Image (cartoon, rainbow, N blue to C red):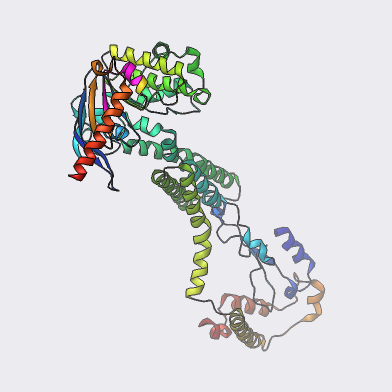
Amino acid sequence: MVADNEAELRKVKVYKNITPTLYRPPTLLSVFNAGLEKGLGDSSRIELESIPKVNAAPTGDNHYMSIFPVLDASLILKIVLSLLAILISYDRISGEKERGTLRLILANRTARHEVLLGKLLAGIVTLAVPATIAFVVGLLVVELSPMADLDWSDWIRIGLMYLASLIFISAMYNIGLLFSCLANRSAISLILGLFFWVVCVAVIPNGSAYVATRIRPLEPKEKTDRQVMLLKSELEKQWWDIMRAVTKGWSRSTSQSDAEGAFGNGYTKRFNIDYFECQQGLHPAMEPLKNK
Amino acid sequence: MIKIDELTKRYEDGVLALDHVSYAVEPGEIFCLLGANGAGKTTTINILLDFIPPTSGSASINGHDCNKFPLEAKKYVSYVSENVQLYGMFTARQNLAFFAELAGKTGLKKKDYDGVMRTVGLPEKALRMRLKHFSKGMRQKLGIAIALLKDPPAILMDEPTSGLDPTSAQEFLAQLRRLKEQDKAILMTTHDIFRAKLIADRVGIMKQGRLVAIRKKQDFKHADLEEIYMHEMQAAETSKVQQDGG
């Protein structure tokens, strides 16, 4: 990326033709949860005489790609481990009832809460192992990367994510265990558990967005586009007003500039100073924009 | 050892499963409960093991009320169910070890397992076999082995001979006699009048939640127990019709 920009810098002859691309570095914790990282653009091309905008995401041109979620630790927890929690828990009690072993267990000096606690702890430990492995692998990826440097706030975030993950899979396991207690047959507890899982993983996340748009409908795209265009043309108009005010009375020596390229003295020193001041918002001509 | 006193159980749907039932099983005694399906035999066992609470009356084992102090009462009782399934993926030894630990028997050695397997008539090599390869008769014997490892003074058996072939059933009865000699109090529910006659010291005949008769060994030793059973059932039916009519 840096090499591309340097090559362009050496190739162009005038400043206005330099169009460097800025890249946004990936978020450190996106290994654990990509969030909107992949859905948003990560680069922007800087051109003179145009307002920079963030490039579309890799999937931006193909809307069908958005149905494929990004595979990260949180997706593994949300889909795979939650399903595993239901599959592990569904016959913990109902299966014992079917086999008749629950009666044999409870015929001993074993209280019901001890049986449930044992099932709960065994399940949580079983599920915590793959969850911990997912986090450890993620941490290794981050730590082994020479560009990454975790500070204490990152460690706290990772710790909280890990804790939340354990609570989430424990909750799913508990729900499966509850269905297992309520049903006399493991087939019924499995159906109840899978139904709950589908509701939690698919219906609620997608359905809530649908319900939200029904309650508070989005403005039509055409209207938003029109507003954006209006704002853009207003900004561009102001920008050109400023440029006109700034360049008024400039002396320009073009004899040498085009021949020597961008590294030469094509524009006068005055241009450089004014342009820098405009960028920093220090130039008197920028006053009208300061309140925008 | 096992005491049932005015025990009544009415389910939430209104069905009266037990109606003021009283009896006791003494050490060294085998008490067989006979009755049709729904007579209340299994309900009695469920109350003794605190699987369900009684509506009124009490059940106790070794003086401990099964409803008020269930964990204390269960110290003195083992349970052999109608269909001993256990854990199919575990070996016999693993099943024995698991249930022995639940019963508070820790630190058992190989000779303890071998001894109990010999006692119930299972070959020692069966210890290493997974339960899913066991026949019903072998599983039933292992169920008794689990009960023996706990070594309690009272044993509850819920239709233990159901589905056993004649040879296995005979071996099972021989095992029961040995347990009786060890002074165990055994309460066994069964439909099998023939085997109840062979093994029981007393039989209790139940009909629709009521204990309609208790007969001692001398009453049926030289008589037809099936005839006695049918007679008592008929008498109970007549008595109920008269009560309803009156």
**Left/right of residue A75 with respect to residue B153 in the rendered view:** right
Residue B8 visible to an observer of this rendering? no
Q: Nearer the viewer, residue B240 or B133?
A: B240
Residue B122's quadrant in the figure?
top left
Q: Quadrant of the N terminus of chain A?
A: bottom right
Task: Tell me what residue is drawn at x 50 percent, y 74 percent.
Answer: A214
Where residue A225 appears, as percent x and y from the top left, is 62, 80
Q: Would you say residue B199 sits in the magenta stretch? A: yes
In-front residue for pair B26/A36: B26
State the residue at coordinates (60%, 78%): A221
Residue A239's spot in the image, x, y percent?
63, 83
Q: Quick one: A35 or B110, which is closer to the camera? A: B110
Q: In the rendered view, does B9 fall on the left or right side of A121?
A: left
Instruction: Point out the stretch of residues depicted in magenta.
Output: B195-204
Residue A135's place in the image compared with A33, above or below, is above
Q: Measured along the vertical axis of the image, is residue B74 above or below residue A250?
A: above
| A51 to A60, vertically: above or below | below
